[in-house]
Image (cartoon, helix red, strand yellow):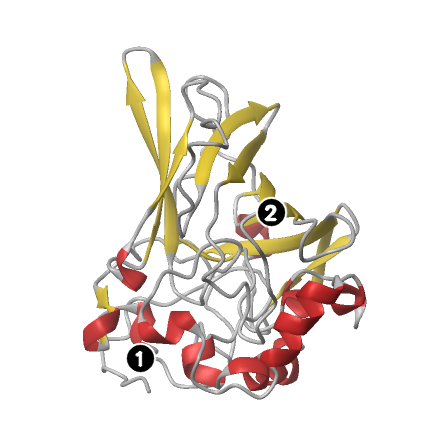
Amino acid sequence: MKSHLVIPATLVVVGLSLVLVHAQQSGRGRQGGQAAQTQGGGGGRQGPTFQGMTIRARDGETNTAVINGPVPRMPDGHPDFSGVWEGGGTDGDMEIDGNLKPGELTSLLTPWGKQIYDSRANVKYEEPYIYCLPMSVPRHNPYPWRFVFNYTSKGLDRIYILHETGDAGAHRVVYMDGRPHPDPATLIPTWWGHSIGRWDGDTLVIDTVGYNDKFWMDARGTPHSEQLHTIERWTRVNYGTMVDEFTLDDPMAFTRPITMKMAARITRPGVDLMEYICAENNQIGLAGGYLKSGSPGIGGGPPPIGK
């Protein structure tokens, strides 16, 4: 499905996270989740823990002092979330990526949710994302992304969440100006929903409603309805690691709210978002997978951060 372009190996990734396998690379439907389970438990040294979640460093990482360094801060005192990140969400299998117990997620499906889930079990080519439609939340493919903070004379106005430029043809907006969600009676369901944010100490809290029911939350077809309500709690725990404590509440699909924990890793300084036009399968940059397995930064372990 995907072509690989050879780019000079000066842009390499570093850091800590779970290994994610993108549905477009690893298979379709339930098979994609199985592929993620096989590859997602890869090596890597045990690192620090955060709220019960162990964060693992990839094999070969040596400069842990930089990774575990202090969190940079903005002039207003809040953590600086800038930088190019990878991971921090689900892709192949929400149970694995979200640090849930095997079978925990599927055991909480309502009869409606289980019917939808089972109908996707043997589907290979019906996942919307493989046709370049938006991945939505909580998906994060293994390509770079970043927070972009937009300030006005009144302060932080909104946050844009950008994925590898052009990926799935959309970006996400988080309103930080204190506005509420629109009236549910007039709210139009969309792929990314309506997101409002606030600071809770050093944690960025993103509250989102108004999703449509068209996207899959992972490659194995975990369902949701238009009643989906998500809350993300993003915390930069050190220089190189950012954790998302993600809660989803969808009474039509699940019998109770579910909380997952996922880690994002920062990439090497100098890496930036580059072009990925999904409809053309045009992947310039990290999205192209230009480093083969075993190369520094992918599979074989990253080089040190810094000089």
In the drawing, does residue 127 fall left or right of residue 110?
Answer: left
Image height check: is 30 above or below 91?
Answer: below
Can residue 307 be seen here? The reply is: no
Q: Is residue 127 above or below residue 265?
A: below
Residue 192 visible: yes
* Coordinates of residue 169 in the picture (x, y in percent): 26, 59
Q: Are marks 1 and 2 in contact (CB under 8 Å)?
A: no
SS label for mark 2: strand
- Which amino acid type is shown beneath numbered disc 1? Tyr
Dot 1 or dot 2, earlier in sequence: 2
Is 76 on the left-hand or right-hand side of 120?
left
* Quadrant showing the N terminus: bottom left
Q: CA distance from mark 1 to mark 2?
A: 28 Å
Residue at 27% in and 11% down: 153
Question: What residue did someone put label 2 on?
Answer: 244
Name which residue type carries label 2. Answer: Asp
Q: Residue at x 51, y 79 (%)?
A: 299
Residue sticking out furthest to the top:
154
- Which residue in the structure is indicated by mark 1? 290
Q: Nearer the viewer, residue 208 or 204?
A: 208
Q: Residue at x 60, y 55 (%)?
A: 263
Binning the other alpha carbons within 10 Å of mark 2 as few (below 14), some (14 to 19) or many (20 upward) gives many
Residue 112 image label: none
Q: x%, y% of residue 250?
A: 66, 49
Residue 30 locus on image (x, y percent): 59, 82
Query: Is 206 in front, or is 121?
Result: 121
- On screen, residue 154 versus residue 195, left or right, reads left
